[in-house]
Image (spheres, grey):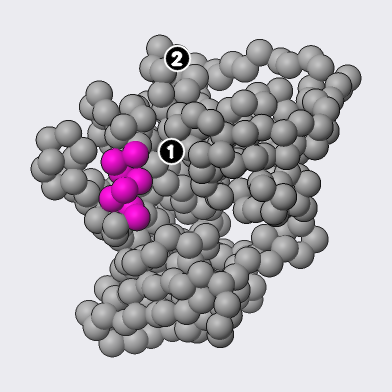
């Protein structure tokens, strides 16, 4: 059974509500499925100041949000997580203090729920840390990407880390297996504009000559194999699917990338080398601790499946 929330206008009058529009809606309309919220944002039914906006739009004081009728579940099942999942989640934690968490996210698990996914990393952590009032993602990585993910445990920590992100003070490095061969240890740079397109309700990011958001990625070859290479990738901007799109754009699609990669190559890598997931891993991050002001580094090792795959190339 379902009921609905009627049309309404909401004016942002409190600084506590200055956050992304999708996060604001998810927090304030808990009974509305996230898939409904994102669909209404995507097709422009939810509007701000009478303008269509993206889910990542950041609210400002005096913004007026128009909310159409949103269907909400009449019967809400109590959320529970099994003991096995809780223990699994605990093993992902690389570092924890009273201010933030660093976890090594596996491939195949979304950072947050929505579109049929009941529990992502953030919902699971909120269940695990029931007595902690504030648990929020500092940044996102794709569902199919593995590696380091930061989670803030206090709002002022989140704000500080967001400021470091905006000012490019957080340094991230990824490892990827890509098609092609190049000179080792030379630093290559990719610069482009990226635009988002939706086909059949599926989001795809594309390089555009003039419009979109400017993006920049650097990469360096660590090891050449037969028509494949292991590369270190440094994103200098943080656009959606940036690394995957950029590497495909320059002729080096990432292994087992089902959206931007090479289909024939993906089949070959799975059949011969047993690669069953996207070979993209966020393995290193450094930033200034918001409280101690010390520069700190974290490292997330490759999972055994990716290590095994690399050994077969040698």
Q: Earlier in the sequence, mark 2 or mark 1?
A: 2
Along the viewing direction, whichever of 50 and 303 lies nearer the viewer: 50
Rendered residue at 72%/59% (across/down): 202
Q: In this rendering, would 161 be left or right of 180?
A: left
**Spot occupied by residue 25 in the image (x, y as percentages of width and height):** 63, 34
Rendered residue at 62%/34% (across/down): 11
Label 1: which residue? Answer: 137
Image quarter (top left, top right, bottom left or bottom right) of the N terminus: top right
- Above or below: residue 54 compared with residue 18: below
Task: Indicate the secondary structure of the residue bearing disc 2.
Answer: loop
Rendered residue at 38%/49% (across/down): 147
Q: Residues within 10 Å of mark 1 (few under 14, many from 20)?
A: some
Corner quadrant of residue 137: top left
Task: Indicate the secondary structure of the residue bearing disc 1.
Answer: strand
**Spot occupied by residue 73 in the image (x, y as percentages of width and height):** 79, 22
Question: CA gap, disc 2 to disc 1?
Answer: 16 Å
Q: Residues within 10 Å of mark 2 (few under 14, many from 20)?
A: few
**Spot occupied by residue 308 in the image (x, y as percentages of width and height):** 39, 57
Label 2: which residue? Answer: 130
Image quarter (top left, top right, bottom left or bottom right) of the C terminus: bottom left
Rendered residue at 28%/87% (across/down): 183
Res 278 visible: yes
Reply yes or no: does residue 196 show up in magenta.
Answer: no
Residues rendered magenta in the picture = 159-166
Corner quadrant of residue 153: top left
């Amino acid at each position: 059974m379902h009921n609905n929330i009627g049309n309404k206008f909401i004016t942002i009058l409190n600084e506590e509500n200055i956050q992304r529009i999708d996060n604001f809606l998810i927090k304030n309309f808990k009974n509305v499925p996230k898939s409904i919220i994102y669909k209404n944002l995507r097709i422009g039914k939810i509007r701000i100041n009478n303008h269509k906006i993206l889910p990542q739009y950041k609210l400002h004081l005096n913004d007026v949000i128009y909310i159409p009728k949103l269907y909400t579940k009449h019967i809400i099942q109590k959320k529970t997580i099994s003991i096995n999942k809780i223990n699994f989640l605990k093993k992902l934690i690389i570092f924890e203090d009273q201010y933030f968490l660093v976890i090594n996210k596996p491939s195949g698990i979304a950072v947050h729920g929505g579109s049929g996914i009941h529990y992502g990393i953030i919902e699971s952590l909120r269940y695990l840390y029931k007595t902690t009032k504030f648990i929020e993602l500092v940044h996102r990585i794709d569902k199919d990407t593995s590696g380091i993910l930061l989670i803030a445990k206090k709002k002022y920590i989140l704000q500080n880390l967001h400021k470091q992100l905006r000012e490019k003070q957080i340094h991230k490095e990824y490892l990827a297996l890509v098609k092609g061969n190049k000179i080792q240890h030379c630093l290559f740079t990719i610069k482009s504009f990226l635009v988002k397109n939706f086909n059949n309700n599926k989001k795809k990011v594309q390089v555009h000559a003039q419009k979109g958001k400017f993006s920049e990625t650097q990469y360096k070859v660590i090891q050449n194999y037969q028509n494949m290479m292991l590369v270190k990738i440094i994103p200098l901007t943080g656009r959606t699917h940036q690394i995957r799109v950029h590497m495909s754009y320059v002729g080096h699609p990432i292994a087992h990338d089902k959206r931007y990669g090479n289909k024939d190559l993906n089949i070959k890598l799975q059949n011969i080398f047993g690669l069953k997931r996207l070979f993209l891993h966020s393995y290193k991050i450094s930033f200034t601790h918001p409280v101690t002001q010390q520069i700190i580094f974290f490292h997330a090792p490759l999972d055994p499946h990716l290590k095994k795959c690399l050994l077969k190339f040698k």
